[in-house]
Each structure stands twice: as C-alpha cells, then as structure tokens.
C-alpha cells in the first residue's frame, strides 16, 4: 500500500450527539458526584474513556443479527449460533453464557474455590480479585518483574512470571485449584502475553495437575500483538493465533463487552464436563437456563457476529494503531505513560507526573478528576483507591498509580483523539498546581465504584 494513514475501517451510519459543558458546570457536576467519576451523569461527559467495556459501537451486521434473536427459553437457535462462534475460536467443549464477565468468574470460583486456596494470575482484574477473595481464597498477582516498571519497554509486559508460578504450585500442593492468565493484562497496563508464555505456563500447570484458565476479555487484541511482535506469527491470521492461545488452556472466562464487540454478555467455557455441570447448576440458580445464561436471544446473536468481526485484520490494525497513536503523541510531549502503549487503553503514570502528591492522597484519582474538570474527559483511576483496600480492612498503597484512558471500540475518531491529546497537554501544563484528594466515605469492598471523595486541600487545582 502506498499510503501511510490507517483510517477507521468503517463509515458511520448512526450518530449519537455528545454534549459540551462549561468548566463551571463540570465543577458543579464533580461536587454533586462526590468527586467520584463513576457517580457522574454520562450526559455531563464529553469524551468517555471510563471503560472499553460494553461501550463500543455495534456493526450493521450485529444489529441485523439481533433481529434474528430467538427468545425461546430453552434450546434457542441463537444459543447454538453463539456456541458455535465460541467453539470455533476456543475449541473448548462446554460453553456457558453469562450476563457478563464477572458472572462467569463468580460461577467458576463458586464451583472451584474453598477458603485458603490460592489463584495465581499475571494480574487479577478488580472484579476477578474480588470474586476470588469473596470465596476466602487468595488472589496472587505474579506478573514478570518488568511489568512493575511503567517506563520500561518490553514487547510482552503482560507475561506471567513462570518461575513464580512454578514456585507457588510446588509449595502449595492441593491449594491451587486453577491458575489464570489475563489477556491482555488490563490492570498491568493493557499489555499482551506472548504465546511462548501461555504455552510454558500451561506446561507448568499441567505438570502439577492444575488447570489453566484464560481471562480472555481482550483475546483478539492479544492475538494481534503476537502477530506483530512474536517470531513465527507474522504470516498467521488473528483467528489462527487466537485458536492456538486457547489450545493451551483448560477453560476461560470472558466478558463479551470487550472483544465480543457487544454491549452486554459473557461466557465461561471449559473442557472438564463434570465441572461444567456444577457450573451450570449454579448458573440456573442465579443467571438462567444454560442456553441463555441471563442474556436475551438477541444478545447471543450480537456476540456471535462480534466474535467474528473482532478478528478482522483491518479492524485490529486500526484498533491497536489508533491507541498507539495517542500514546506516541503523549510520549513525545513528555507525559509519562506505561510503555509501550496498551491494546485497549493508555495508562498515565500519575506517580511520575505528580510526584508532589503522596500516595495516601491518591495522585491518580486527583489527576482523573482534573482531566474531567479541564476537558470533560472521563477516565478511570487504577491505583490506591481501587486496590489499596486490603481484605482485612487495612490500607496498603498500590504498586502503581495509573489513570486509564480506555477506548471504546469503533466509537471515537481521529479528531476525538487529537482533542484528547490537547487536553492532556493542557493538564500537564498545570500539573504542579494539582492537589491530592481524600476519602470521605467508602464501602468495605470495590470502594472505587461508590466512594465519596473530596479535595484534600480545598481545591483540585491550586490558584496560580
Ligand atoms: N476481566 C478483565 C480483564 C476485565 O477487564 C473485566 C472488566 C472483567 C474481567 C469483568 O468483566 O465487566 O463483563 O463483568 N473490565 C472492565 C474495565 C469493567 O473497565 O476494564 P465484566
């Protein structure tokens, strides 16, 4: 191709207006939302990068598929289409639909874990960790050491530490009912995991008789990184790469709100028939019959089509490139981000950007509030508000203080990206005046969703 520009590989058929607000309006909105961006009204947000989960645009083929939704309570045609789409990629024997990823986690852990167990993972996502801990088991994060240094470049910074995995399994026989690998590693910066790492982790687990599960939320983005960066995969299609990734594991949990390109849905899949039966029994108790699992027939159709579209090369090239573009602009402007840029998100290293704010005043949370105040952009803290609260009620600072800019799929365009870079530059210009925040009130678990916060020193941005 003689042209360099990678364009959005779609044209727009339906539009949804977004609303500009004034700084004064946003100041008021923040106060009303107790300085917690989760408590804002979406209509007060201009560019919403809170999450890439369920926020993407569906294609015309997905909407057309939804019209064919079979809403039969049991044995719906839509279930079989969905099941086939999942099996074509994963080759896993039993596919159980759930309303989203965390339902798959709860059902899996509810069927497998007992108090005192340990679940190793490269890095648990917050709901995964919470669901493990809810069973009184330990969620153990063992990413490779390189993952802890935000500025360090590594092609597969999402890898699990194989030595640490071997050690946990050796030292805790009978206490590790499963190990997990999260692709891509969301809480660790949206970084990919290499095929070699998955293959070797699988070998180690199987030598110890422990099943390995993928948290497969962003499996297609991970497959694309393997194609770009791992020796021997350049000529393979994303589908072939994904199939190989799944060939090493015994099961997976999945949120179809990410690489299912759907607005809701998820699944649990595995080879162990006896475990699948136990999971289905629990599914019936809280989600629904095993051929719909809490979803409408039309949701299953949207996911079936989405799983096909997400492996399209033009889509993946555009997806990964457009996130990298923003990352490169920020690096050029001296804004510290987790390097290299992740698949679905850019993570700003708030500890490096705001060294004057101590961790107990939550620098990443403060930065996310200022990004909204100044530019109407909503992001998410992945730092000590999210991870600082320990199961025993004590507080421990998180290893990193990150602000995540997560990009909904097929939703924003290049000019939104350029606006965003401008906002970040502007905020970087006033970084020395940004002040910390404090917790006013918080629930005992997953506090970031509902905590009431306040500026620790009167205002978020000190006067000049
Ligand atoms: N695992 C990972 C790696 C995730 O990123 C998420 C969700 C889940 C599991 C749970 O899936 O939301 O469908 O229940 N992540 C979203 C995010 C919420 O913003 O990163 P869910």
Image (cartoon, rainbow, N blue to C red):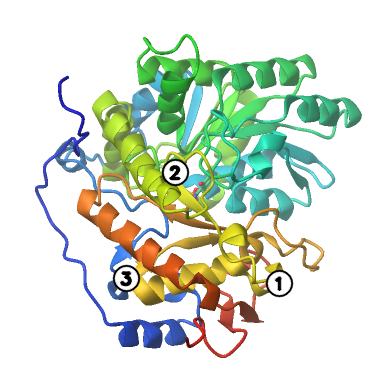
Q: Give the mark nearer the N terminus: 3 vs 2.
A: 3
Q: Give the mark nearer the N terminus: 3 vs 1.
A: 3
Q: Quadrant of residue 397?
A: bottom right
Q: Nearer the viewer, residue 79 or 451?
A: 451
Q: Is residue 112 left or right of residue 268?
A: right
Of the 4 image quadrants, the one containing the N terminus is: top left
> Residue tagged by mark 1?
360
**Image height check: is 95 above or below 11?**
above
Q: Nearer the viewer, mark 3 or mark 2?
A: 3
Point 26% across, 43% down: residue: 298
Q: Secondary structure at mark 3?
A: loop
Give the CA separation, mark 3 to mark 2: 33 Å
**Image height check: is 327 above or below 303?**
below
Q: Is residue 320 left or right of residue 120?
A: left
Q: Is residue 398 visible?
A: yes
Q: Is residue 177 left or right of residue 91?
A: right
Question: Looking at the picture, how far across and down is residue 427, in whole percent?
Answer: 42, 69
Q: Residues within 10 Å of mark 1 (few under 14, many from 20)?
A: some
Q: Secondary structure at mark 2?
A: loop
Point 43% across, 87% down: residue: 32
Q: Secondary structure at mark 1?
A: helix
- The answer as to whether callout 1 falls within 8 Å of ligand 1 is no
> Residue tagged by mark 2?
293
> Residue tagged by mark 3?
45
């Amino acid at each position: 191709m003689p042209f360099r520009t990678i364009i959005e590989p779609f044209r727009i058929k339906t539009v949804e207006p977004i609303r500009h607000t004034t700084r004064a309006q946003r100041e008021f909105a923040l106060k009303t939302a107790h300085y917690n961006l989760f408590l804002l009204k979406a209509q007060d947000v201009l560019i919403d990068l809170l999450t890439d989960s369920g926020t993407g645009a569906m294609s015309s083929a997905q909407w057309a598929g939804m019209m064919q939704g079979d809403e039969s309570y049991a044995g719906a045609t839509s279930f079989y289409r969905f099941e086939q789409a999942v099996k074509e990629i994963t080759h896993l024997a039993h596919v159980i639909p759930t309303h989203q990823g965390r339902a798959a986690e709860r059902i899996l852990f509810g069927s497998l874990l007992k108090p005192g167990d340990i679940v190793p993972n490269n890095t648990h996502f917050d709901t995964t960790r919470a669901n493990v801990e809810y069973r009184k088991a330990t969620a153990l994060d063992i990413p490779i050491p390189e993952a802890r240094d935000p500025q360090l470049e590594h092609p597969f910074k999402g890898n699990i530490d194989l030595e640490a995995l071997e050690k946990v399994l050796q030292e805790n026989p009978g206490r590790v009912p499963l190990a997990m690998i999260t692709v891509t590693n969301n809480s660790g910066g949206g970084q990919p995991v290499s095929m070699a790492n998955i293959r070797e982790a699988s070998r180690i687990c199987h030598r110890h008789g422990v099943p390995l599960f993928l948290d497969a939320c962003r499996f297609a983005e991970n497959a694309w990184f393997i194609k770009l960066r791992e020796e021997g995969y350049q000529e393979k299609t994303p589908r072939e790469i994904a199939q190989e990734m799944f060939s090493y594991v015994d099961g997976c949990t999945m949120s179809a709100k990410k690489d299912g390109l759907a607005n809701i849905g998820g699944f649990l899949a595995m080879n162990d028939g006896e475990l699948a039966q136990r999971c289905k029994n629990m599914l019936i108790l809280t989600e629904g019959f095993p051929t719909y699992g809490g979803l409408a027939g039309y949701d299953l159709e949207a996911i079936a089509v989405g799983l096909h579209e997400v492996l399209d090369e033009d889509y993946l090239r555009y997806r990964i490139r457009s996130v990298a573009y923003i990352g490169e602009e920020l690096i050029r402007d001296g804004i510290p981000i987790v390097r290299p840029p992740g698949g679905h998100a850019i993570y700003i290293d708030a500890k490096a950007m705001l060294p004057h704010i101590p961790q107990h005043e939550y620098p990443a949370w403060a930065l996310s509030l200022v990004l909204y105040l100044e530019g109407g952009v909503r992001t998410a803290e992945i730092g000590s508000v999210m991870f600082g609260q320990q199961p025993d009620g004590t507080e421990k600072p998180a290893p990193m203080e990150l602000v995540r800019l997560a990009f909904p799929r097929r939703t924003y365009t290049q000019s939104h990206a350029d606006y965003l870079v401008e906002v970040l530059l502007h905020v970087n210009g006033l970084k020395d005046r940004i002040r910390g925040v404090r917790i006013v009130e918080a629930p005992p678990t997953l506090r970031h969703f509902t905590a009431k916060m306040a500026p620790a020193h009167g205002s978020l941005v000190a006067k000049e």
